[in-house]
């Protein structure tokens, strides 16, 4: 039986289709989850995809964080279920307190939409085990609130514990502290990043298939479990 | 009776009334139902006479001083280009006006501000009760 990976759709989510496609590329079953769902339909992992949930009103991700489906997601994540937040999904996981820090408006105020090189800094997580440490990958990024910030003590802690998973390479595009593009939870099961691995799973439709490694990694982690 | 036939009968009846000098609408205009308060624009039955007192609360949310505020910086730059002199700093935040009844205490307001209207990682906030 293949792994069941849930993909959440909030009102305003854009990338649930591509996220589900990436899950299927990794030979897992993509299970659609709706923002109003009270349970996770027995999924083994969850992807919180990108977009503009609830129009980014109030603050990116904050209203989605209080959607009914997030209660079981937070519970399951604390119990060790692999959860991946991409772009708006990363913002939602930060608002939910599953990952530290927050995203603010890009320095320079531009909506940045381009293919971006990242360095994989941590291959111990449930979502990055398929990469070689220090590998550089090319995946798209597209956001306006992508500047990662956190208190200095939090940044020091992330660095000391090796919890920076992805770092921007070739110049910091948006002012993110310490060039941070993605981070992980303490137990390495929850990962969030601003760029979009689900858009880079096939050279036909993306700049590379570098993003597929994240979904293969999750399937590996679930088989081992 | 099929609706087309019913409509045809009604047209015939109205035509006959007009032919004998009667109004198409015998009885004239109907008086409004007694629950519609036209002056207020709302049904009087919907007005709750025992509404709790409503107070206005203002929550101002600002980026923390140590957090970069690129929007404020952009506004500052533009103010200079527009020829306004003497402007030293602009920071951009959010201003919420909330109407609450007297069941909402200060602790609840603090919870709303800290857990929802502001993100304590990047923002600070003030809560002000203004006169009812």
Image (cartoon, coloured by chain):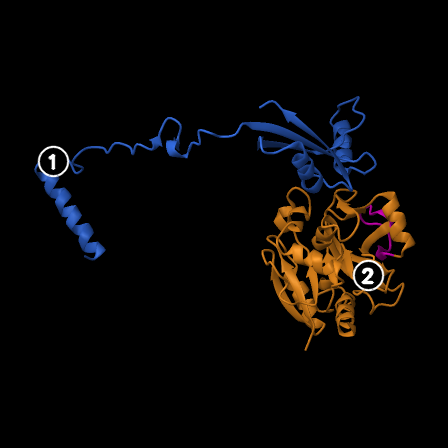
Chain colours: A orange, B blue
Residue B22 shows which numbered tag? 1
Whether residue B61 is visible: yes
Residue A33: image quadrant is bottom right
* Placement of A220 over or under B60, stated as above or below: below
Q: State the image coordinates of residue A140 (x, y, percent, origin top left).
A: 75, 58
* Placement of A207 over or under B118, stated as above or below: below
Q: Nearer the viewer, residue A39 or A92?
A: A39
Q: Is residue B40 left or right of residue A208?
A: left
* Placement of B32 over or under A204, stated as above or below: above
- The quadrant of the image that shows the C terminus of chain B is top right
> Within the magenta stretch, is there residue A110?
no
Mark 2 nearby-residue class (10 Å; few <14, some 14–19, many ≥20): many
Provide the chain ID for the residue under circle 2: A
Whether residue A84 is visible: no
Q: Report if the CB atoms under discs 1 and 2 are less than 8 Å apart.
A: no
Mark 2 falls on what kind of element? loop
- Residue at 59 percent of width and 53 percent of height: A11
- The quadrant of the image that shows the N terminus of chain B is bottom left
Q: State the image coordinates of residue A94 (x, y, percent, origin top left).
A: 75, 50
Mark 1 nearby-residue class (10 Å; few <14, some 14–19, many ≥20): few
Provide the chain ID for the residue under circle 1: B
- Residue at 69 percent of width and 75 percent of height: A2
Label 1 to label 2: alpha-carbon separation = 86 Å
Q: State the image coordinates of residue A130 (x, y, percent, origin top left).
A: 82, 70
User: To which residue does mark 2 refer?
Assistant: A188
Give the residue furthest to the right.
A160
Q: Nearer the viewer, residue B44 or B51?
A: B51
| Range of magenta residues | A163-178
> Within the magenta stretch, is there residue A170?
yes
Q: Nearer the viewer, mark 1 or mark 2?
A: 2
């Amino acid at each position: 039986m293949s792994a069941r990976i849930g993909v959440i759709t909030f009102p305003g989510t854009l990338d649930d289709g591509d996220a589900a496609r990436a899950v299927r590329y990794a030979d897992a079953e993509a299970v659609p989850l709706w923002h109003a769902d009270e349970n996770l339909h027995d999924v083994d992992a969850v992807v919180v995809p990108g977009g503009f949930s609830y129009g980014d009103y109030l603050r990116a991700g904050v209203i989605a964080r209080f959607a009914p489906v997030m209660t079981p997601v937070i519970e399951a994540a604390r119990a060790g279920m692999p959860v991946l937040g991409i772009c708006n999904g990363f913002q939602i996981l930060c608002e939910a307190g599953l990952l530290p820090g927050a995203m603010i408006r890009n320095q320079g105020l531009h909506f940045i939409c381009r293919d971006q090189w990242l360095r994989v800094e941590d291959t111990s997580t449930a979502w990055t085990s398929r990469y070689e440490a220090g590998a550089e990958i090319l995946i798209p990024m597209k956001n306006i609130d992508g500047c990662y910030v956190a208190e200095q003590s939090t940044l020091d802690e992330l660095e000391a514990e090796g919890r920076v998973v992805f770092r921007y390479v070739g110049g910091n595009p948006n002012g993110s502290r310490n060039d941070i593009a993605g981070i992980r939870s303490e137990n390495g099961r929850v990962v969030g990043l601003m760029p979009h691995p689900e858009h880079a799973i096939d050279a036909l439709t993306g700049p590379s298939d570098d993003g597929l490694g994240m979904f293969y990694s999750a399937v590996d982690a679930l088989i081992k479990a | 009776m099929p609706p087309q036939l019913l409509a045809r009968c009604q047209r015939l009846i109205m035509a006959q009334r007009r032919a004998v000098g009667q109004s198409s609408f015998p009885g004239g205009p109907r008086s409004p139902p007694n629950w519609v308060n036209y002056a207020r624009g709302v049904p009087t039955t919907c007005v709750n006479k025992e509404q709790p007192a409503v107070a206005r609360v203002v929550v101002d949310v600002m980026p923390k001083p140590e957090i970069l505020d690129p929007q404020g910086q952009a506004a500052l730059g533009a103010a200079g280009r527009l020829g306004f002199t003497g402007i030293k700093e602009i920071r951009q935040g959010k201003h919420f006006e909330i109407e609450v009844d007297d069941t909402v205490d200060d602790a609840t307001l603090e919870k709303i501000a800290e857990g929802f209207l502001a993100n304590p990682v990047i923002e600070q906030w003030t809560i002000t009760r203004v006169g009812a």
